[in-house]
Image (cartoon, grey):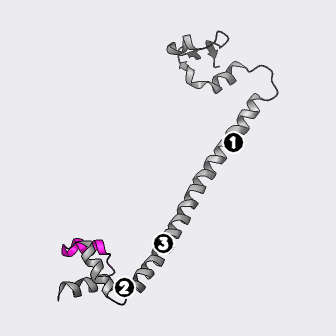
Amino acid sequence: MSKKDEIITLYFDEKMTAIEISKKINVVKSYITKILKQDARYDAEKQRRKDENKVKRRNFNKENMRKVRKRNSIANEVLQMQHIQASYELSGRKIMNNRTFRNWNSSIYRFHNKTSEYRIKEEMLDKVSYAVPKKIKWK
């Protein structure tokens, strides 16, 4: 079997791409394309592969969008629940109590088991306002 026949067989029968064929038989891609263009079936096969890939790409994008929307839906539900909780905690009061303040600023406090209270972290003392509670009892 000559190289031309092998290229044509691999492309049309084995459904390999020009790049795959070039790697397999160790010939440059341009030579393979040149041989394939001489075959009468080439344009029809090329169009068929294009259409097939278009459908595959469309299906992949649809599936990917479904996954993204599902992830976003779950994230939106969590965000909505957090918003409801925040609205509940902050509504109806002119002054925020210490526990609510600690919940909203949890990153600046550290819990001390011995005294059962939250205290501002040492590194945060010079960064917070004097009005911020330094200790919050938790019993």
Question: Are the residues tagged 1 and 2 within 8 Å (C-beta)?
Answer: no
Q: Which residue is mark 3?
A: 56
Residue 20's place in the image compared with 80, above or below, is below
Residue visible at 65% across and 14% down? 132
Residue 66's place in the image compared with 137, above or below, is below
Residue visible at 69% across and 43% down? 80
> Of the numbered discs in the image, which one, if any, rests on residue 81?
1
Q: Which residue is mark 2?
A: 42
Q: CA distance from mark 1 to mark 2?
A: 58 Å
Sequence-wise, the earlier of marks 3 and 1 is 3
Q: CA distance from mark 3 to mark 1?
A: 38 Å
Q: Position of residue 28 (x, y in %)?
A: 23, 72
Q: Amino acid at mark 1?
A: Met
Q: In the rendered view, does 88 fall on the left or right side of 101?
A: right
Q: In the rendered view, does 113 fall on the left or right side of 10?
A: right
Highlighted range, magenta: 14-27
Sequence-wise, the earlier of marks 1 and 2 is 2
Q: Position of residue 101 (x, y in %)?
A: 67, 22
